[in-house]
Image: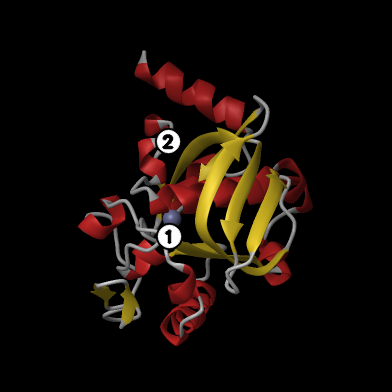
Amino acid sequence: MVRAGSRAILVKPAKLEIVQAGNPVLRQRARPLSLTEIRSREIRKLIETMRTCMREAPGVGLAAPQLGLPLQLAVIEDREEYHKEVSEALLKERERSPLPFHVIINPELEVVGEEKAEFFEGCLSLAGFTALVSRARAVRVTCLDEHAKHKVIEATGWYARILQHEIDHLAGTLYIDRMHARSFTSMENLAAFWKGKPVNEIREELEQKSS
Ligand code: ZN
């Protein structure tokens, strides 16, 4: 248990399972953590658990609500080994490069500039599906790290997308709330029908089919 004033919450996830869309916890606004909580053994253990879950999935980000806990905490890591299956061209187009493991707590996100980037994006809580999501290309995030130290992150490209996706989770928002709805597809069908096509062509094709 972690005690925050008179409040006490159970921080141990019921089971090490990533909750799927439909679970109300994914639609709740997560609550911030106090400095005492951040330094507690329970939160340290939770961060370890989240790292394990994210790696096992595998994924490049995981927010506490995805383990059933409505807390403003997320972990991020984009390992080099994940890039082996992605073409050089796609990595470049997505502005994706490896990110070391790190923790964001009580984050505030600010969009930088007006540039947008649109790519297929997935979520461990909507396993097996993906859709085109337009996001800001650059963001600034102010947050605390796992030592309760103040941190400012400036990010562009895929990292900016991961941050927006994870911070959305803390506000009860999922990518399906922001997606180009007609592009929603199973991963299998993405590979079968859309792989390798530029995003603007996919959009065009989907829009033609609607008229
Ligand atoms: Zn997600």
Determine if the C-beta at disc 1 is less than 8 A from ligand 1. no
Q: Which mark is residue 72?
A: 1
Name the residue located 35 percent from the left edge and 58 percent from the top edge. Answer: 31
The secondary structure type at the circle numbered 1 is loop
Instruction: Classify 52 as above or below 20.
Output: below
Residue drawn at (39%, 21%), measured in percent from left and top?
209
Q: Position of residue 46 (x, y in %)?
A: 44, 79
**SS class, disc 2:** loop
**Horizontal side of residue 108 vs 70, given as left or right:** right
Query: Is residue 185 shown left or right of residue 23?
Result: right
Residue that lies at the very extreme toward the front in this rendered image = 5
Circle on res. 179? 2
Q: Which dot, 2 or 1, sits closer to the camera? A: 1
Nearest the viewer among 118 and 70 is 70
Q: Ligand 1 closer than 8 Å to the CB at disc 2? A: no
- Kindly report the distance in space between the C-alpha atoms of the residues bearing marks 2 and 1: 23 Å
Count of numbered circles on the image:
2
Say the numbered circle drawn on residue 168.
none
Mark nearer the N terminus (2 vs 1): 1
Please state which of residues 164 and 190 is positioned toward the viewer in this rendering: 164
Q: What crowding class fits label 1: few (fewer than 14 Cα within 10 Å), some (14-19), or many (20 or more)? A: many
Against 40, is 186 above or below? Answer: above
Q: Quadrant of ligand 1?
A: bottom left
Image: 115 above or below 164: above
User: Do we see residue 191 in this rendering?
Assistant: no
Single out the residue that lies furthest toward the top.
211
The residue located at (73%, 41%) in the rendering is 93
Q: Quadrant of the N terminus?
A: bottom left
Q: Check disc 2 and give the amino acid type.
A: Met
Q: Quadrant of the C terminus?
A: top left
Q: Report x, y in % for residue 55.
A: 54, 75
